[in-house]
Image (cartoon, rainbow, N blue to C red):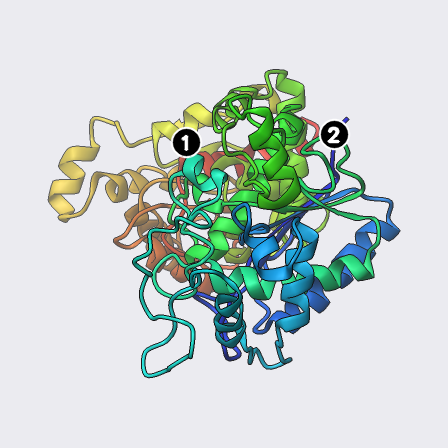
Amino acid sequence: MTLFDRYIAVDWSAANERRAGKDSIWVAERGPEGLRPSLNPPTRAEATALLIERFAAARAAGERIMVGFDFVFGYPKGAARAIAGKAGWRAMWEAIGAAVQDSSENKSNRFEVASGFNRTLELAHFWGHPPHHRYADLLPTRPLHGYLHIAEHRLAESYARGPQPVWKLSGAGSVGSQALLGIARLRHLKSEFPEAKVWPFETAFEADLGPLALVEIYPSMFPLSGTVEPKDREQVEVSVARFAELDAAGLLGEFLSAPGVLLASQKRDALEEEGWIAGVGHEHLLRIAARRYLRNPDAIYAESFAIIEREADLSRFSGPLRDVVIRMIHACGMVDIVGDIRVGGDFATAASAALAVGAPILCDAEAVRSMIIARHLPGNELIVTLNDAAVPALAAERATTRSAAAIDLWRDRLRGAVVVIGNAPTALFRLLELLEAGAPKPAAIIAAPVGFVGAAESKAALADSRSGVPFLTLLGRRGGSAIAAAALNAIAAGAGT
């Protein structure tokens, strides 16, 4: 049993205006249904309202939720007593909540709050503000006193070796402004959901996580692919994926536990005032979780198709055609190809009927033929003419590719056949030329040639052709033998042959 049913990660922002896209708020969410579309609310007020809505829906469904925020929850030991007059994280949160003003349009007084807090400290600790602004007790650059009174970094930062100090309010990597404005919002979330517990203060690290855990996270600890823009969005999406993986592997509790290297006094400071960063000291668990992969082939197969059902928009397809599209997605691992799949005529019925009566299957490449599952067929001949001895001379004579020349050898076998092209755009172009010139018509065409030159154009030509032959194609540059063969295999399996 997992600790949570749903995982949410929030990349916070201290922007002083409505902002979307890069350097703004991003919210990723992963539940039993898979990864939901990430959201980008332009203000902290809208983000808070969104989270309240999502928490309420999940709790109404009886789900347990882990919510990670990428800002600091606590301050170095001694800060609360110096600023709030009493020790402990609650005192610091109350002082921040009482001082911060944050409008519905993202206008805040965070620099004034920091300047006021500096006046109560023996030495000014907060620093950093926008150029061309002046604040009575807030310097634009790091103070020179060396943080001898209260430490510059929490203990967690000394282990993480990456996060900036919470005192830094602006500039590259700064987290101070996000912390002031984020903590104020967390207090509101806790008032809306009394069952919410702030990790690790109220949970004793992993001892009592409760049904709704608010957790400090550091998304930069998770490697990114760089394929998702902006980076903030990929960070939260990767974060919820890693949390779900750790939980499924039975490792999330340990990931949220206190590192064994902490002394008893250090653990007490973390629990009472400083807080911690989820996973710091347990980074090795990420490698362990990655190695705990599914090994049962039936389970892998079932989970693969379950993911496709969750993540792909299959609403345009039904019946046998829906199964074909699912198999095509499974062959390449890209759910977004669903938007580029085009069908002409009653393709599924025509292809299935032709296969059932033993029609030949004409393949443009050996790779396509090798991927077709023979046991689904009633003895259909699989034909590839690319390596026929006559092809090189024919290609030279016509100044074309071998793939295109090989299609001319199909002429006497085209009528009623099923054509499967998964490699060469020139093969598809030549087939269309032959059909336009009056060649016998095949029963159906599966066309998914791949490449940068001619692939998109050849498939667009098929989609626009008036041959009347039912077809299935994948528009654009993407395609390949595996996708084309997967479509044929799905039709064959569905036909019960």
| Dot 2 crowding, Cα within 10 Å, few <14, some 14–19, many 20+ | few
Q: CA distance from mark 2 to mark 1?
A: 55 Å
Q: Is residue 6 left or right of residue 129?
A: right
Q: Residue furthest front?
A: 122
Residue 160 drawn at (x, y percent) = 43, 37
Q: Nearer the viewer, residue 140 or 292?
A: 140
Q: Is residue 417 left or right of residue 98?
A: left
| Dot 1 crowding, Cα within 10 Å, few <14, some 14–19, many 20+ | many
Secondary structure beneath label 2: loop
Q: Quadrant of the C terminus?
A: top right
Residue 352 drawn at (x, y percent) = 63, 39
Residue at the image position 80 percent from the left and 61 percent from the top: 191
Q: Nearer the viewer, residue 98 or 461?
A: 98
Label drawn at residue 33? none
Q: Is residue 446 left or right of residue 145?
A: right
Residue 64 drawn at (x, y percent) = 79, 42
Label drawn at residue 207? 2
Q: Quadrant of the N terminus?
A: top right
Q: Is residue 202 left or right of residue 493?
A: right
Q: Which residue is the site of mark 1? A: 368
User: As shown in the figure, which amino acid type bears the numbered disc 2?
Assistant: Ala
Secondary structure beneath label 1: helix
Residue at the image position 33 percent from the left and 70 percent from the top: 140
The residue mark sitting in front, 2 or 1, is: 2
Whether 424 is drawn above or below 296: the answer is below
